[in-house]
Image (cartoon, grey):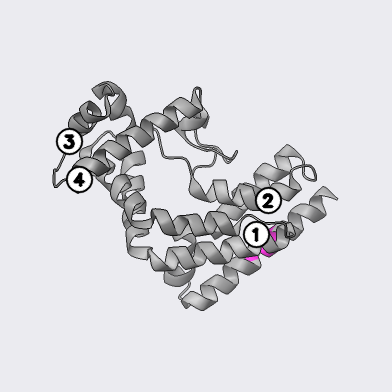
């Protein structure tokens, strides 16, 4: 969803999105500060505008609007993060460990499938917000991609085995078999059950990994 996108700002390189282009740590802190301020105001019963959130976070309005061009998009990201945040960490944990890359990857795909199934409605809403964002505000910065982060973690044992180009290609290909998009394609377009969808995604991830290793060797 964020591979080689607008003006090269969205790449499968571990931290795709606006935050990869210059002062990455600062930009991520700015986004998190805005989200934290919005979350606090919403929890207090307010319905803050982007400008009000910027003021609460001590960030200029012009900067805030670069991250959240509209109140609707700000709410979509904040509410989605609040809804799925804790459960998403289980996917990150699945990508870690001392196992082989094949086992780490399979475990990550299964954890992503469970997470996506549990939060399907919230993730669909997030996808709608994302599509609205890139349609109406093509230069707006995006949140770093979680799927690329946890897939990168699962593939970490291959860091010295695959060339940078081969690693990027594998990471991009694997990004197609996880997340809400993969669930919609397999279960809506293809008419599979949730269990069948999980089986297809695990098979595809394994096949892509084998292909990458065969091509590299």
Q: Secondary structure at mark 2?
A: loop
Residue drawn at x 32%, y 28% as measured from the top left: 66
Give percent across and percent down for residue 163. 77, 40
Residue drawn at x 51%, y 61% as measured from the top left: 112
Q: Nearer the viewer, mark 4 or mark 2?
A: 4
Residue position marked by numbered label 3 in the rendering: 49
User: To which quarter of the image does residue 199 belong?
Assistant: bottom right
Residue position marked by numbered label 2 in the rendering: 155
Give me the C-alpha separation between circle 4 and circle 1: 37 Å
Residue drawn at x 43%, y 28% as measured from the top left: 27
Q: Residues within 10 Å of mark 1 (few under 14, many from 20)?
A: many
Residue position marked by numbered label 1 in the rendering: 105
Can you say whether 136 is above or below 98 in the image?
A: above
Q: Do the numbered discs 1 and 3 sit on residues whose CB atoms are within 8 Å? A: no
Q: Earlier in the sequence, mark 1 or mark 3?
A: 3
Q: Secondary structure at mark 4?
A: helix
Is residue 100 found left or right of 146 in the rendered image?
Answer: right
Q: Earlier in the sequence, mark 4 or mark 1?
A: 4
- Residue 131 highlighted magenta (yes or no): no
Q: Nearer the viewer, mark 3 or mark 4?
A: 4
Give percent across and percent down for residue 12. 58, 41
Residue position marked by numbered label 4 in the rendering: 42
Give me the C-alpha separation between circle 3 and circle 4: 10 Å
Q: Earlier in the sequence, mark 1 or mark 2?
A: 1
Does the rendering let one see residue 136?
no
Give percent across and percent down for residue 193. 47, 78
Q: Do the numbered discs 2 and 3 sit on residues whose CB atoms are within 8 Å? A: no
Task: Please identify the residue farthest to the right as the structure is shown.
Answer: 217
Give percent across and percent down for residue 93. 56, 56
Q: Which residues are drawn in magenta?
A: 204-208
Is residue 152 found left or right of 192 in the rendered image?
Answer: right
């Amino acid at each position: 969803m964020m591979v080689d996108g607008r003006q090269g700002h969205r790449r499968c390189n571990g931290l795709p999105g606006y935050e990869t282009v210059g002062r990455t740590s600062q930009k991520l802190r700015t986004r998190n500060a805005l989200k934290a301020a919005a979350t606090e105001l919403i929890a207090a019963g307010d319905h803050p505008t982007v400008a009000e959130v910027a003021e609460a976070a001590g960030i200029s309005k012009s900067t805030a609007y670069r991250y959240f061009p509209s109140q609707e998009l700000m709410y979509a990201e904040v509410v989605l993060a609040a809804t799925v945040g804790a459960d998403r960490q289980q996917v990150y944990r699945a990508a870690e460990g001392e196992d082989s890359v094949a086992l780490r990857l399979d475990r990550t795909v299964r954890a992503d499938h469970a997470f996506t199934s549990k939060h399907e409605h919230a993730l669909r809403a997030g996808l709608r917000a994302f599509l609205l964002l890139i349609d109406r505000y093509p230069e707006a910065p995006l949140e770093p991609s979680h799927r690329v982060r946890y897939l990168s973690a699962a593939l970490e044992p291959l860091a010295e085995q695959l060339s940078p180009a081969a690693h990027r290609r594998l990471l991009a290909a694997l990004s197609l078999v996880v997340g809400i998009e993969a669930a919609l394609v397999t279960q809506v377009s293809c008419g599979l059950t949730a269990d069948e969808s999980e089986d297809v995604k695990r098979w595809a991830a394994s096949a892509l990994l084998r292909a990458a290793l065969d091509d590299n060797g």
